[in-house]
Amino acid sequence: MNVLKIILPVLVMIGLGISCRKWKFLSKTGINDMKFLVTNIMLPVAIFHALATADYNLETGKLVLIMFLMLLISFGIGFLLKPLMTGVYQKYLPFMVSVYEGGLMAYPLYTSLCGQENLSQIAVLDIAGLLFGFSIYMGMLGQTENGEKINAKSLALSAVKTPAFIASVLGIIAGLTGIIRCLLESSWGNVYLSVENILTTSVTAIILIVVGYSFELTPELLSPCIRTILLRTALQAVMIAGVLFTVHSFVENNKLLDLAVISYMSAPATFSMQTFLKKEESSAYVSTTNSMYCVVSILVYMVLAFTVS
Protein backbone atom coordinates (compact mmCIF):
# COMPACT_ATOMS: atom_id res chain seq x y z
CA MET A 1 0.00 0.00 0.00
CA ASN A 2 2.91 2.40 0.76
CA VAL A 3 4.36 1.80 -2.72
CA LEU A 4 0.96 2.46 -4.30
CA LYS A 5 0.59 5.70 -2.33
CA ILE A 6 3.93 6.90 -3.71
CA ILE A 7 3.72 5.61 -7.28
CA LEU A 8 0.03 6.13 -8.11
CA PRO A 9 0.16 9.99 -8.09
CA VAL A 10 3.18 9.81 -10.42
CA LEU A 11 1.39 7.41 -12.77
CA VAL A 12 -1.81 9.50 -12.70
CA MET A 13 0.04 12.67 -13.76
CA ILE A 14 1.98 10.80 -16.47
CA GLY A 15 -1.34 9.35 -17.64
CA LEU A 16 -2.82 12.85 -17.72
CA GLY A 17 0.08 13.96 -19.93
CA ILE A 18 -0.55 11.02 -22.28
CA SER A 19 -4.25 11.95 -22.44
CA CYS A 20 -3.39 15.60 -23.17
CA ARG A 21 -1.47 14.51 -26.25
CA LYS A 22 -3.95 11.84 -27.38
CA TRP A 23 -7.01 14.10 -27.08
CA LYS A 24 -5.10 17.25 -28.13
CA PHE A 25 -5.86 19.10 -24.89
CA LEU A 26 -2.37 20.61 -25.12
CA SER A 27 -0.37 21.58 -28.18
CA LYS A 28 3.34 21.08 -28.69
CA THR A 29 3.74 24.85 -28.33
CA GLY A 30 1.92 24.72 -24.99
CA ILE A 31 4.23 21.95 -23.76
CA ASN A 32 7.29 23.96 -24.83
CA ASP A 33 5.95 26.96 -22.91
CA MET A 34 5.53 24.75 -19.84
CA LYS A 35 9.12 23.55 -20.23
CA PHE A 36 10.32 27.17 -20.37
CA LEU A 37 8.38 28.04 -17.22
CA VAL A 38 9.82 25.07 -15.32
CA THR A 39 13.45 25.38 -16.43
CA ASN A 40 13.74 29.16 -16.06
CA ILE A 41 11.63 29.94 -12.99
CA MET A 42 10.04 27.15 -10.98
CA LEU A 43 12.85 24.59 -10.93
CA PRO A 44 15.60 27.14 -10.09
CA VAL A 45 13.54 28.40 -7.13
CA ALA A 46 13.05 24.83 -5.86
CA ILE A 47 16.77 24.06 -6.24
CA PHE A 48 17.80 27.26 -4.45
CA HIS A 49 15.53 26.55 -1.49
CA ALA A 50 16.64 22.91 -1.18
CA LEU A 51 20.34 23.82 -1.12
CA ALA A 52 19.90 26.97 0.97
CA THR A 53 18.20 25.00 3.76
CA ALA A 54 20.53 21.96 3.70
CA ASP A 55 22.98 21.22 6.53
CA TYR A 56 26.66 21.54 5.64
CA ASN A 57 29.59 20.01 7.54
CA LEU A 58 32.75 17.98 6.89
CA GLU A 59 30.83 14.72 6.43
CA THR A 60 28.51 16.46 3.99
CA GLY A 61 31.52 17.64 1.99
CA LYS A 62 32.90 14.11 1.79
CA LEU A 63 29.58 12.68 0.62
CA VAL A 64 29.13 15.41 -2.00
CA LEU A 65 32.64 14.77 -3.33
CA ILE A 66 32.10 11.00 -3.46
CA MET A 67 28.78 11.38 -5.28
CA PHE A 68 30.17 13.99 -7.69
CA LEU A 69 33.09 11.74 -8.65
CA MET A 70 30.68 8.81 -9.05
CA LEU A 71 28.50 10.88 -11.40
CA LEU A 72 31.52 11.83 -13.50
CA ILE A 73 32.60 8.19 -13.71
CA SER A 74 29.17 6.81 -14.60
CA PHE A 75 28.64 9.58 -17.14
CA GLY A 76 32.04 8.82 -18.69
CA ILE A 77 31.30 5.09 -18.83
CA GLY A 78 28.08 5.97 -20.65
CA PHE A 79 30.16 7.24 -23.57
CA LEU A 80 32.11 3.96 -23.62
CA LEU A 81 28.80 2.04 -23.75
CA LYS A 82 27.48 3.96 -26.77
CA PRO A 83 28.51 1.22 -29.27
CA LEU A 84 26.00 -1.07 -27.51
CA MET A 85 23.18 1.18 -28.74
CA THR A 86 22.20 1.79 -32.33
CA GLY A 87 20.50 4.53 -34.29
CA VAL A 88 19.67 8.05 -33.17
CA TYR A 89 19.29 7.00 -29.52
CA GLN A 90 22.99 6.18 -29.20
CA LYS A 91 24.01 9.77 -28.51
CA TYR A 92 21.64 9.99 -25.51
CA LEU A 93 22.93 6.87 -23.73
CA PRO A 94 25.48 8.65 -21.47
CA PHE A 95 22.70 10.90 -20.20
CA MET A 96 20.34 7.98 -19.60
CA VAL A 97 22.74 5.89 -17.50
CA SER A 98 23.76 8.74 -15.17
CA VAL A 99 22.03 11.16 -12.73
CA TYR A 100 18.91 10.36 -10.68
CA GLU A 101 15.33 11.43 -10.10
CA GLY A 102 15.51 12.34 -6.42
CA GLY A 103 12.46 14.44 -5.66
CA LEU A 104 9.81 12.48 -7.54
CA MET A 105 11.04 8.93 -6.94
CA ALA A 106 13.96 8.38 -4.54
CA TYR A 107 12.83 10.81 -1.82
CA PRO A 108 9.29 9.47 -1.30
CA LEU A 109 10.38 5.84 -1.49
CA TYR A 110 13.15 6.45 1.06
CA THR A 111 10.96 8.40 3.49
CA SER A 112 8.36 5.66 3.27
CA LEU A 113 11.08 3.20 4.23
CA CYS A 114 13.00 5.19 6.85
CA GLY A 115 10.72 8.05 7.89
CA GLN A 116 10.48 11.75 7.04
CA GLU A 117 12.82 12.58 9.93
CA ASN A 118 15.69 10.88 8.08
CA LEU A 119 15.16 12.69 4.77
CA SER A 120 18.46 14.56 5.20
CA GLN A 121 20.32 11.27 4.70
CA ILE A 122 19.23 11.12 1.07
CA ALA A 123 18.93 14.87 0.45
CA VAL A 124 22.66 15.38 0.99
CA LEU A 125 23.38 12.85 -1.78
CA ASP A 126 21.33 14.96 -4.18
CA ILE A 127 23.53 18.04 -3.73
CA ALA A 128 26.14 16.59 -6.09
CA GLY A 129 23.38 15.55 -8.47
CA LEU A 130 22.04 19.10 -8.64
CA LEU A 131 25.49 20.62 -9.18
CA PHE A 132 26.52 18.07 -11.81
CA GLY A 133 23.10 17.82 -13.41
CA PHE A 134 22.59 21.52 -14.05
CA SER A 135 26.13 22.28 -15.17
CA ILE A 136 28.05 19.60 -17.09
CA TYR A 137 25.13 17.25 -17.70
CA MET A 138 22.45 19.64 -18.98
CA GLY A 139 25.02 21.76 -20.82
CA MET A 140 26.29 18.75 -22.78
CA LEU A 141 22.72 17.54 -23.30
CA GLY A 142 21.87 20.87 -24.91
CA GLN A 143 24.91 20.65 -27.21
CA THR A 144 24.01 17.07 -28.13
CA GLU A 145 20.37 17.97 -28.78
CA ASN A 146 21.44 20.85 -31.08
CA GLY A 147 23.90 18.64 -32.97
CA GLU A 148 26.90 20.63 -31.73
CA LYS A 149 30.33 19.25 -30.88
CA ILE A 150 31.10 19.08 -27.17
CA ASN A 151 33.05 22.23 -26.39
CA ALA A 152 34.40 22.98 -22.91
CA LYS A 153 34.34 26.76 -23.36
CA SER A 154 30.76 26.90 -24.62
CA LEU A 155 29.80 24.38 -21.93
CA ALA A 156 31.15 26.67 -19.22
CA LEU A 157 29.42 29.70 -20.74
CA SER A 158 26.20 27.73 -21.01
CA ALA A 159 26.40 26.68 -17.35
CA VAL A 160 26.83 30.19 -16.00
CA LYS A 161 23.83 31.31 -18.05
CA THR A 162 21.60 28.42 -16.94
CA PRO A 163 19.10 29.52 -14.24
CA ALA A 164 19.20 26.13 -12.51
CA PHE A 165 23.00 26.18 -12.22
CA ILE A 166 22.98 29.78 -10.95
CA ALA A 167 20.34 28.74 -8.41
CA SER A 168 22.53 25.82 -7.32
CA VAL A 169 25.56 28.05 -6.70
CA LEU A 170 23.53 30.72 -4.91
CA GLY A 171 21.74 28.03 -2.88
CA ILE A 172 25.01 26.56 -1.62
CA ILE A 173 26.32 30.03 -0.72
CA ALA A 174 23.09 30.75 1.15
CA GLY A 175 23.30 27.36 2.86
CA LEU A 176 26.89 27.86 3.97
CA THR A 177 26.19 31.35 5.29
CA GLY A 178 22.90 30.30 6.90
CA ILE A 179 21.12 33.40 5.63
CA ILE A 180 17.92 31.58 4.63
CA ARG A 181 17.76 29.63 7.88
CA CYS A 182 18.02 32.94 9.74
CA LEU A 183 15.26 34.36 7.54
CA LEU A 184 13.05 31.35 8.29
CA GLU A 185 13.48 31.93 12.02
CA SER A 186 12.52 35.60 11.70
CA SER A 187 9.08 37.16 11.41
CA TRP A 188 9.56 37.12 7.62
CA GLY A 189 9.97 33.33 7.55
CA ASN A 190 6.34 32.57 6.75
CA VAL A 191 6.31 35.22 4.03
CA TYR A 192 9.37 33.67 2.37
CA LEU A 193 7.86 30.17 2.58
CA SER A 194 4.56 31.36 1.12
CA VAL A 195 6.32 32.86 -1.91
CA GLU A 196 8.60 29.84 -2.34
CA ASN A 197 5.67 27.46 -1.99
CA ILE A 198 3.46 29.12 -4.60
CA LEU A 199 6.36 29.21 -7.08
CA THR A 200 7.28 25.54 -6.66
CA THR A 201 4.12 23.66 -5.69
CA SER A 202 3.18 22.86 -9.29
CA VAL A 203 6.67 22.02 -10.60
CA THR A 204 6.27 18.27 -9.98
CA ALA A 205 2.89 18.10 -11.68
CA ILE A 206 4.08 20.07 -14.72
CA ILE A 207 7.21 17.95 -15.19
CA LEU A 208 5.17 14.73 -15.00
CA ILE A 209 2.62 16.06 -17.52
CA VAL A 210 5.52 16.86 -19.87
CA VAL A 211 6.92 13.34 -19.33
CA GLY A 212 3.52 11.80 -20.06
CA TYR A 213 2.94 13.98 -23.11
CA SER A 214 6.15 12.61 -24.64
CA PHE A 215 5.51 9.00 -23.59
CA GLU A 216 5.16 6.77 -26.65
CA LEU A 217 5.24 2.98 -26.22
CA THR A 218 5.74 1.90 -29.84
CA PRO A 219 7.48 -1.20 -31.23
CA GLU A 220 10.28 1.03 -32.52
CA LEU A 221 10.94 2.43 -29.04
CA LEU A 222 10.55 -0.79 -27.06
CA SER A 223 13.90 -2.32 -28.02
CA PRO A 224 16.13 0.75 -27.37
CA CYS A 225 14.26 1.54 -24.15
CA ILE A 226 14.67 -1.97 -22.74
CA ARG A 227 18.33 -2.05 -23.77
CA THR A 228 18.92 1.29 -22.05
CA ILE A 229 17.20 0.07 -18.88
CA LEU A 230 19.37 -3.06 -18.78
CA LEU A 231 22.56 -1.05 -19.30
CA ARG A 232 21.61 1.50 -16.64
CA THR A 233 20.66 -1.23 -14.16
CA ALA A 234 23.96 -3.09 -14.64
CA LEU A 235 26.08 0.07 -14.42
CA GLN A 236 24.25 1.43 -11.37
CA ALA A 237 24.60 -1.90 -9.54
CA VAL A 238 28.38 -1.60 -9.91
CA MET A 239 28.34 2.09 -8.96
CA ILE A 240 26.22 1.43 -5.84
CA ALA A 241 28.75 -1.14 -4.66
CA GLY A 242 31.59 1.33 -5.27
CA VAL A 243 29.87 4.20 -3.46
CA LEU A 244 28.96 2.03 -0.45
CA PHE A 245 32.56 0.81 -0.18
CA THR A 246 33.91 4.38 -0.41
CA VAL A 247 31.38 5.75 2.09
CA HIS A 248 32.21 2.99 4.59
CA SER A 249 35.93 3.67 4.13
CA PHE A 250 35.95 7.48 4.33
CA VAL A 251 32.69 8.63 5.94
CA GLU A 252 30.82 6.20 8.19
CA ASN A 253 29.12 2.83 8.37
CA ASN A 254 25.50 3.90 8.74
CA LYS A 255 22.53 1.70 7.79
CA LEU A 256 20.26 4.68 7.12
CA LEU A 257 22.88 6.18 4.80
CA ASP A 258 23.35 2.82 3.06
CA LEU A 259 19.62 2.63 2.39
CA ALA A 260 19.71 6.22 1.14
CA VAL A 261 22.51 5.41 -1.33
CA ILE A 262 20.72 2.34 -2.67
CA SER A 263 17.33 4.09 -2.92
CA TYR A 264 18.78 7.18 -4.59
CA MET A 265 20.94 5.33 -7.11
CA SER A 266 18.09 2.96 -8.02
CA ALA A 267 15.94 5.83 -9.29
CA PRO A 268 15.53 6.57 -13.01
CA ALA A 269 17.36 9.39 -14.74
CA THR A 270 16.05 12.82 -13.78
CA PHE A 271 12.59 13.59 -15.14
CA SER A 272 13.59 17.26 -15.49
CA MET A 273 15.86 16.14 -18.35
CA GLN A 274 12.62 16.06 -20.34
CA THR A 275 12.19 19.81 -20.08
CA PHE A 276 15.56 20.42 -21.79
CA LEU A 277 14.76 18.32 -24.89
CA LYS A 278 13.32 19.88 -28.04
CA LYS A 279 13.06 17.00 -30.53
CA GLU A 280 9.98 14.77 -30.38
CA GLU A 281 11.95 11.60 -31.10
CA SER A 282 14.40 12.13 -28.25
CA SER A 283 11.62 13.23 -25.90
CA ALA A 284 9.65 10.05 -26.58
CA TYR A 285 12.70 7.83 -26.02
CA VAL A 286 13.74 9.52 -22.77
CA SER A 287 10.21 9.76 -21.39
CA THR A 288 9.35 6.13 -22.16
CA THR A 289 12.64 4.80 -20.77
CA ASN A 290 12.36 6.76 -17.52
CA SER A 291 8.73 5.78 -17.03
CA MET A 292 9.53 2.09 -17.55
CA TYR A 293 12.57 2.33 -15.27
CA CYS A 294 10.26 3.17 -12.37
CA VAL A 295 9.57 -0.58 -12.19
CA VAL A 296 13.23 -1.12 -11.24
CA SER A 297 12.96 1.48 -8.48
CA ILE A 298 9.84 -0.19 -7.09
CA LEU A 299 11.44 -3.64 -7.12
CA VAL A 300 14.50 -2.34 -5.26
CA TYR A 301 12.22 -0.63 -2.72
CA MET A 302 10.34 -3.89 -2.13
CA VAL A 303 13.61 -5.77 -1.51
CA LEU A 304 14.82 -3.06 0.90
CA ALA A 305 11.45 -3.03 2.69
CA PHE A 306 11.68 -6.79 3.17
CA THR A 307 15.25 -6.60 4.53
CA VAL A 308 14.51 -3.84 7.06
CA SER A 309 11.18 -5.23 8.30
Image: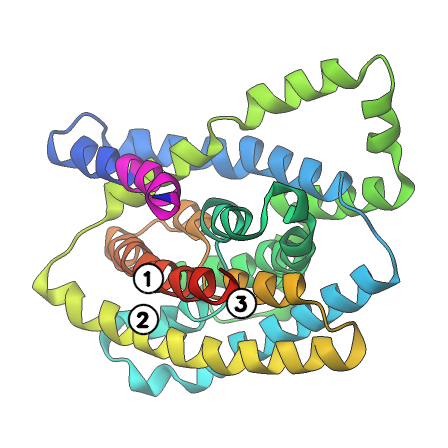
Q: What percent of the width, then of the height, locates residue 117?
A: 67, 43
Between 174 and 126, the one lying in front of the other is 126
Between 182 and 214, the one lying in front of the other is 182
Classify residue 225 as left or right of residue 161.
Answer: left
Work out whether 70 lies above or below 126.
Answer: below
Q: CA distance from mark 1 to mark 3?
A: 15 Å
Q: Which numbered tag is attached to residue 293? A: 1
Amino acid type of the residue tagged 2 in the rendering = Ile
CB atoms of marks 2 and 1 within 8 Å: yes
Tell me what residue is drawn at x 68 percent, y 40 percent: 50
Amino acid type of the residue tagged 3 in the rendering = Ile
Tell me what residue is drawn at x 40 percent, y 32 percent: 205
Between 147 and 268, the one lying in front of the other is 268
For label 3, the residue is: 262
Amino acid type of the residue tagged 1 in the rendering = Tyr
Q: How many neighbours does mark 3 have within 10 angstroms: few (below 14), some (14-19), or many (20 or more)?
A: many
Q: What percent of the width, then of the height, locates residue 228?
A: 31, 73
Task: Identify the image quadrant of the N terminus.
Answer: top left
Q: Disc 1 or 3, which lies upstream in sequence?
A: 3
Q: Which numbered tag is attached to residue 214? A: none
Please give the range of residues in magenta: 2-13
Q: What percent of the width, then of the height, locates residue 272?
A: 46, 47
Q: Nearer the viewer, mark 1 or mark 3?
A: 3
Secondary structure state at the residue bearing disc 1: helix
Q: CA distance from mark 2 to mark 1?
A: 6 Å
For label 2, the residue is: 229
Work out whether 249 lies above or below 178.
Answer: below
Whether 9 is among the magenta residues is yes
